[in-house]
Image: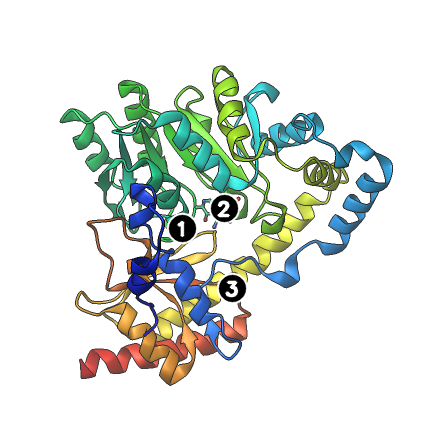
Amino acid sequence: MLLTDDAPIREQRPYHLAQWAEQAERSVLRQMIDVVSRPDILSFAGGLPALELFPQEAYAEAMARVLHDDARALQYGPPYKPLKEQIVALMAQRGVSCTLQQVFITTGAQQALDVLTRLLLNPDGEVLLEEVVYTGMQQALAPHGPRILPVSTDLQEGMDVDVVERWLTTGARPAFIYAIPEAHNPLGVSLSAERRERLVGLAQRYGLPIIEDDPYGFLSDGETPPPLRALNEEWVFYVGSFSKILAPALRLGWIVAPEALAPQLTVAKEACDLESSALTQRAVAAFLQAGHLPGHLSRLREAYGRRRRAMLASLAQHFPAEARWTEPTGGMFVWVALPPGVDTVALLERTIAEEEVAFIPGHAFAIPGCQANHCLRLNFSNATVAQIEDGIARLGRVIGEWLIRD
Ligand code: PMP
């Protein structure tokens, strides 16, 4: 059994937890990642950046300099202004113009999602969410118990904006729409330019905030449509992260939101952790100031692009004709849909037992009431081209046999 049944543990618990916590289970994703991170397993399961590509030396230098030069790096302190200035410049590279006062530093994008949810959502509120979506957003929502209005996603063009419009024209007034327009996690799809325009138009018309989650935006190849925030500064609250462009362990991210929200954002964040690490903020600002990011980003794009193309070519070569998958232009994931009826949790047991290769079953990303049992997510950022070619061939063999046998 890959997924442990923790019901007996729950029965023994002497505590009365809040209602949402009584129902919460450890994320299916985490449970699976524990199982599939055995060293003998070739894993496409996690969502990790490549360890060997971290700019370890340059960051170590920046950190040493900061620690040596200024004891305020170890003190409580307000958000570090030079970092905000660097973020304004970074946003300009994504085609977004914003001011220092609109930038709000967070402890990772995950905290940004948590803080924005607390800011916008009432206990009896509603939220518009894709049927298959980043589990961290689902976790941020869980304590608030909102009614979720599901939206389907097209694997070529992204979120189905017709469905969004139908919800709104039939009277739904969600607290916000959550969107990952660039290289979606877990689907790998990017929202088309036309759908971006329409989605933002709906937000404007109905006075509805969009939380735009963009951790992968700097990693895409070639020309990409502008982020939603470039189209509208009033209704789009942009969330950025240093996790994928620098390193997740920094736990540093940001929000670009209307300046008028700054006091409430500050209160919500202070409840979480008072402030983000002064040391990390200064070290990242020093790293950026030294001009390391552009070269690092092109190395990442080049390496991840090679891995992504290898995965897509291997899928075409080794997966059965009935399988469909997304063709991302960036990010870290490819989403595969097998014929309906294939249970990818059972398939995972078989690929581990027979070929020692792992992925995440689609089920892990489906919102309550929706299902993606015949789908799976593959990560390409954390395996070499040789491992990708070998692993996808092995997965393809097991899937091919499954389709013949079952
Ligand atoms: N949003 C998405 C879509 C993600 O994939 C992730 C990380 N996997 C996050 C937010 C959280 O990022 P951070 O490490 O900055 O908290």
Viewer-nearest of discs 3 and 1: 1
Cβ at disc 2 under 8 Å from ligand 1:
yes
Using a 10 Å C-alpha cutoff, classify the residue at mark 1 as few (fewer than 14 neighbours), some (14 to 19) or many (20 or more): many
Give the residue at mark 3. Answer: 307
Q: Does any portion of residue 226 appear in the rendered image?
A: no
Residue 129, x across and y down, in percent:
29, 40
**Is residue 18 shown above or below 372?**
above
Question: Which residue is painted at 32% across and 35% down in the image?
Answer: 144
What element does badge 2 sit on? loop
Viewer-nearest of discs 2 and 3: 2
Give the residue at mark 1. Answer: 185
Give the residue at mark 2. Answer: 216
Question: Which residue is painted at 42% across and 76% down in the image?
Answer: 357
Q: Earlier in the sequence, mark 2 or mark 3?
A: 2
Name the kind of residue labelled 3 in the image. Answer: Arg
Question: Which residue is painted at 40% across and 50% down in the image?
Answer: 185
Q: CA distance from mark 2 to mark 3?
A: 15 Å
Name the kind of residue labelled 1 in the image. Answer: Asn
